[in-house]
Image (spheres, helix red, strand yellow):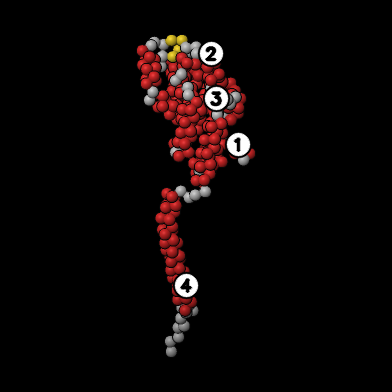
Amino acid sequence: MSMILSEPDLVLLNRFRESRDAEAFREIVRRYAAAVYATCHRILHDPGRAEDAAQETFYRLMTRPQRVSASLGGWLHRAATRLALDIQRSDTSRRRREATYESTQTKDASTWADVVPQLDEALATLPEELRDLLVRHFLRGESQSELAAELSTSPATLSRRMKSALDALRQELGRRGIGLTPMILLKLLTENGRATVSPSLHLALGKMSLYCAAKQALVHPVTLARRLTMWPRAVWSIRWALAGATLSIGVCASAILALSRVDWRPARINPPA
């Protein structure tokens, strides 16, 4: 278990994707549960519905891990954002707030209520590399020095990349009618990036990990069917290979036997009388 704690995200994801490793999935949940729940709660403002959205996010990861191609944290944030927004859009009050945002001009925002639910939606539109930096630093709480060491880059280079990511996020928010100074955006992200995972969410995600562990002990029906389909082919391939080898050996043996019976001595010529 100590080894799995130090493995990078994509290594854990590959372990789970290839063999449905329950320990790998549980470690992914441990790393990202707080960030995913915080994303859902920022949009929904309701602990119960935020927990439902967080559970559904991890369930989608569990059932469709092949959809993650690059950043695990970025994919989880985007999936959680879309789920929470879908829930929120079903509410009449949410539709009224959207109409209000569309009818207003850009304004300075200084409170969290002015930014929600636009922040996560804007963050989800950023390029993968920029979104991953912001998710890992602000939503997961990883320090810039830790990120620089893992990405094999200098702290100065990482700082410039972080600034570019924040600038891109601020510009996207501006297009959505939310004007933020860099300092206000940094403050809001720092103060509201994470949330405490409730015992009920811990329990629900624990049950999901248990479900993974139970499934891991079984052979997937599709995989089993493929193996059963391939097995006769493999048997016949081996049989044909053995038959071919036997035939080749027989031909070689016959040739050797025939050659052994040939009198290779030069013919004796009798001199003329």
- N-terminal of the pair, mark 1 or mark 2, is 1
Earlier along the polypeptide chain: callout 4 or callout 2? 2
* Tag 2: amino acid: Met
**Does any portion of residue 47 appear in the rendered image?**
yes
Provide the residue designation for mark 2: 183
Determine which residue is flagged by label 4: 253
Q: CA distance from mark 1 to mark 4?
A: 61 Å
Specify the quadrant that holds the C terminus: bottom left
22 vs 252, nearest the viewer: 22
Q: How far is mark 4 from mark 3, CA to CA?
A: 79 Å
Disc 3, SS: loop
Of label 4 and label 3, which has the lower sequence position? 3
Mark before the other along the chain sequence, 2 or 3: 2
Residue depicted at 43% across the width and 87% down the height: 272
Question: SS at mark 2?
Answer: helix
Residue 190 x, y percent position in the rendering: 55, 19
Mark 3 crowd level (few <14, some 14–19, many ≥20, 10 Å Cα): some
Q: Secondary structure at mark 1?
A: helix
Above or below, 225 against 145 in this view is below
Q: Are discs 4 and 3 less than 8 Å apart at CB?
A: no
Secondary structure of the residue carrying numbered label 4: helix
Residue pointed to by mark 1: 5
Q: Which residue is mark 3?
A: 195
Question: Which residue is outermost to the right?
Answer: 2
Tag in front: 1 or 4: 1
Q: Are marks 1 and 2 in contact (CB under 8 Å)?
A: no
Task: Please tell me which residue is depicted at 43% across the width and 64% down the height of the picture.
Answer: 239
Could you give the CA–CA distance between mark 1 and mark 2, rounded to whole angstroms? 34 Å
